[in-house]
Image (cartoon, rainbow, N blue to C red):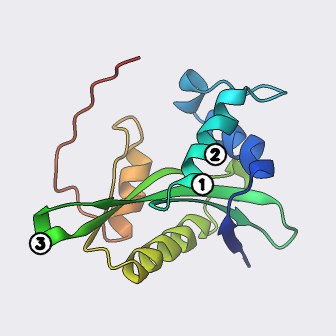
């Protein structure tokens, strides 16, 4: 399938939030409604104003948004002042899964990270998504660390 990856715009926010909200975990934490709550637009403005954040959408040949991903570049002192890329909020519209779109999106993200001089690309995945873990391992990611979270809200 022919796809196009481009930076997200404010007009894309409802489609992005819809994809985030329409999975088994997103249903529990997102607030997708029409009109979309202002907090999503506020977050979008903070993301696009940060040069270390890239929020992208995937368009199919009909210019329909069928996926999204956020790529964050994190400067460290470790690894001799290296930069890490963190991949978050990956979604492919349910009608388009299993067609290689996710793989193309990750290939784009890894190439973008290389262009920025990144030394490691990392991501987290919820343990309730074993199919995602299998997908990431097929892309070459290794389950090398144990992550922890402390929810504050």
Q: Which mark is residue 23?
A: none
Spatial CA distance of label 1 from label 3 is 28 Å
Q: Are marks 1 and 2 in contact (CB under 8 Å)?
A: yes
User: In the rendered image, which residue does mark 2 sit on?
Assistant: 45
- Image height check: is 66 above or below 119? above
User: In the rendered image, which residue does mark 1 sit on?
Assistant: 48
x, y (%) of residue 26? 56, 31
Q: Is residue 121 left or right of residue 70?
A: left
x, y (%) of residue 139? 38, 70
- Image height check: is 127 above or below 112? above
Give the residue displayed 17% in from the left and 69% down from the top.
Answer: 81
Q: Is residue 43 left or right of residue 114?
A: right
Task: Estimate how packed mark 1 is, as few (under 14), some (14 to 19) or many (20 or more) residues with alpha carbons within 10 Å.
Answer: some
User: In the rendered image, which residue does mark 3 sit on?
Assistant: 80
Of the numbered discs 3 and 2, the one sitting upstream in the chain is 2
Image quarter (top left, top right, bottom left or bottom right) of the C terminus: top left
Decide if residue 22 is in sight here: no
Q: Are marks 3 and 2 in contact (CB under 8 Å)?
A: no
Q: Secondary structure at mark 3?
A: helix
- Image height check: is 10 above or below 104? above
Of the numbered discs 1 and 3, the one sitting upstream in the chain is 1
Q: Secondary structure at mark 2?
A: helix
Give the residue displayed 77% in from the left and 30% down from the top.
Answer: 36
Which quadrant would residue 1 be assigned to in this image?
Answer: bottom right
């Amino acid at each position: 399938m022919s796809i196009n990856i481009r930076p997200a715009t404010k007009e894309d926010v409802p489609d992005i939030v819809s994809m985030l909200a329409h999975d088994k975990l997103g249903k529990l934490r997102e607030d997708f409604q029409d009109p979309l709550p202002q907090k999503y637009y506020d977050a979008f403005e903070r993301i696009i104003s940060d040069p270390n954040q890239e929020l992208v959408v995937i368009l199919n040949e009909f210019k329909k948004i069928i996926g999204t991903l956020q790529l964050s570049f994190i400067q460290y002192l470790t690894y001799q002042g290296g930069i890490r890329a963190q991949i978050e909020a990956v979604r492919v519209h349910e009608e388009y899964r299993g067609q290689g779109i996710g793989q193309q999106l990750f290939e784009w993200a890894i190439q973008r990270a290389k262009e920025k001089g990144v030394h490691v690309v990392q991501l987290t995945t919820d343990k309730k998504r074993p199919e995602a873990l299998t997908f990431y391992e097929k892309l070459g990611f290794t389950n090398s660390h144990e992550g922890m979270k402390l929810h504050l809200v």
